[in-house]
Amino acid sequence: MKSCLEIIANVASILTALVAAGAAGYYACDRRNKRTKLENYLRDEKLSNPDRHTHTLLHLMAKLGLTESEILNASFRSRRIIRREHIDKATNLTDQILFEYQERPTSN
């Protein structure tokens, strides 16, 4: 018959696996929610204002309540969001990243 410590160790290892699976599921859902939040906002903006449908990182941070890294990560995971660069005419270097929604997903 197994000792009490062996049973506790087995239960602890099972609970550890369940907690890890739950945390991984939560993390995946959170990432997906941030991506769809960004996609939906950019899609709605493109439909309501077709002349001005690219947005800066700072604008998206203010409107969506996401951090810079969350927006960048969501845009890299999305096949519907394209990133464009705004070139400063004085230095000829990129000074802003612009985000835009496109209807047809890109192939990654």
Image: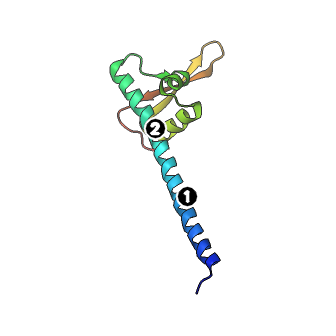
Q: Quadrant of residue 50?
A: top left
Q: Residue at x 66, y 16 (%)?
A: 91
Q: Amino acid at mark 2?
A: Arg
Query: Would you call the spot at circle 1 few (<14 residues within 10 Å), some (14-19), or many (20 or more)?
Result: few
Q: Residue at x 41, y 28 (%)?
A: 41
Residue 14: % across, % down: 54, 68
Q: Quadrant of residue 32?
A: top left
Q: Quadrant of the N terminus?
A: bottom right
Helix, strand, or loop for circle 2?
helix
Q: Residue furthest front?
A: 4
Is residue 79 depicted above or below 96 in this figure?
below
Helix, strand, or loop for circle 1?
helix
Is residue 33 depicted above or below 61 in this figure?
below
Front residue of 88 and 75: 75
Front residue of 54 and 107: 54
For label 2, the residue is: 35
Residue 93: % across, % down: 63, 21
Q: Residue furthest right?
A: 91
Is residue 13 depicted above or below 60 in this figure?
below
For label 1, the residue is: 20
Colour setting: rainbow
Residue 49: % across, % down: 36, 17
Mark earlier in primary sequence (2, 1): 1
Front residue of 76 and 107: 76
